[in-house]
Image (cartoon, helix red, strand yellow):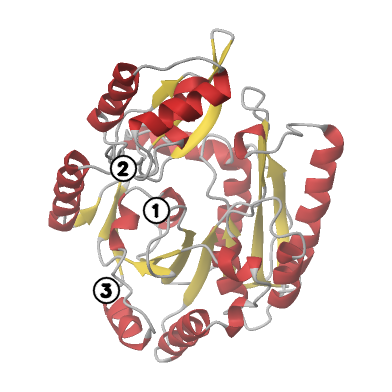
Amino acid sequence: MDPALPKPRSIEVFPVEVDGRKLICLRDPLQYATDALVVAYPAFVVLTLLDGVHSIVDVQEAFAQRFGAIISSEEILELLATLDRHHYLESARFATRRAEVVAAFQAESLRPAAHAGASYPADPAELRRYLDGFFTALPPAPAPRGRLRGLVAPHIDLRAGGAAYGHAYRTLADTADAERFVILGTAHYGGATLFSATRKDFATPLGTVATDRDFLDRLAKRAPDDLYADELLHRTEHAVEFQVVMLQHVLGGRRPFTVVPILVTSFHEMIARHRTPGDDPRVAGFVAALGDTLAEDGRPTAIVAGVDLAHVGEKFGDPEGLDPEFLAAVEAKDRRLIAALEAADRDAFFAATADDGDRTRICGFSPLYTLLSLVDGARGRLLCYNRTRDEATRSSVSYASLAYGLE
């Protein structure tokens, strides 16, 4: 029996167009592989057949049935060698690479600014000017009244969502008396547990933001699962990092504050089964643990959810692409979700997401549901709704900013 070929790791795969050719881009969101790879469609088909079970002969037979042509064993092995060299395969080479990355992250006293120099400027002065632009372009707004208890902000790339970040963090700067911010970020590539924290302080180009380790230690004792089992997810995840950068920009020169960084993994299994997350002991146990930990000291605290909404179009597997009727239906669903968020109605929010099986791939359902479980019914106010439009991949991402606790 021919030996099975190794299988690829869990990676991002999406279509791109290069010089008029439609190709497939491979990218590692966890950045064990630092280089993206672009392959032709036939090579991508070979990649889909690498499952740890198929042999070279199996792949050749499936390829011939698909394309009516022969692919040589040398071509398959060359593709495998390229994938392995760039750490895209589950292999001994990747195991060594992963061990090196884990050891380096554990040795760091700070969580480095992983996206500085890419999603936002690494130079402090340039970054301040860049972020200032998010606010100067905003229309005047009436002075808000009340005390901010919760905030929904995007986690889309800062280069795309500047206005929505501006709306969110202008409101936070004007209304939040919090000295501590619990940040619930989307864990795009989840681990074994639903909630993951890190005790590391966050480095930003604007300085270091302290993590409230005492709070986390008390929370960890109450939480139903190990909060640090998947700490490595924080290494490259941007959902918390972008909120930390924005907080440092609007508050760093005004008053001291700390953060409680928590990544929330997908609740998709519950959505698929139409099982309300609040009935899951892992979710209910964490919400109770966080609520109790917040209640045991009087330090002013606000909760921030770093989330996006719909992810649709060809990049995400929708043949409709940017069809106007399809996008109108997507926005209509977004508006239903936002209405449930404004009402702080987590059951309605769950129903609006689950009724169509999360057809629009809400990238933030889990942190949003968690936030709604913690704001004690305080109504939300929509500050901004927007969406991107990427003609190259015929895809769109929507996002919104909301504030809780204001009159």
Q: Calculate the distance from the C-alpha at mark 2 to the C-alpha at mark 1.
A: 10 Å
Q: In the image, residue 73 lies at what x, y percent? A: 32, 21
Please tell me which of labels 1 and 3 falls first in the chain: 3
| Amino acid residing under circle 2 | Pro
Q: Quadrant of residue 88?
A: top left
Q: Quadrant of the N terminus?
A: top left
| Amino acid residing under circle 1 | Gln
Q: In this view, does 365 lie above or below 139?
A: below
Q: How many marks?
A: 3
Q: In this view, does 7 lie above or below 404?
A: above
Label 1: which residue?
248
Q: In the image, residue 177 lies at what x, y percent? A: 50, 71
| Left-right relation of 97 to 304 | left
Viewer-proximal residue among 33 and 139: 33
* Residue in the image at 38% along x and 83% along y: 223
* Residue in the image at 42% along x and 36% along y: 120
| Amino acid residing under circle 3 | Arg
Q: Nearer the viewer, mark 1 or mark 3?
A: 3
The image's mark for residue 213 is 3
Label 2: which residue?
205
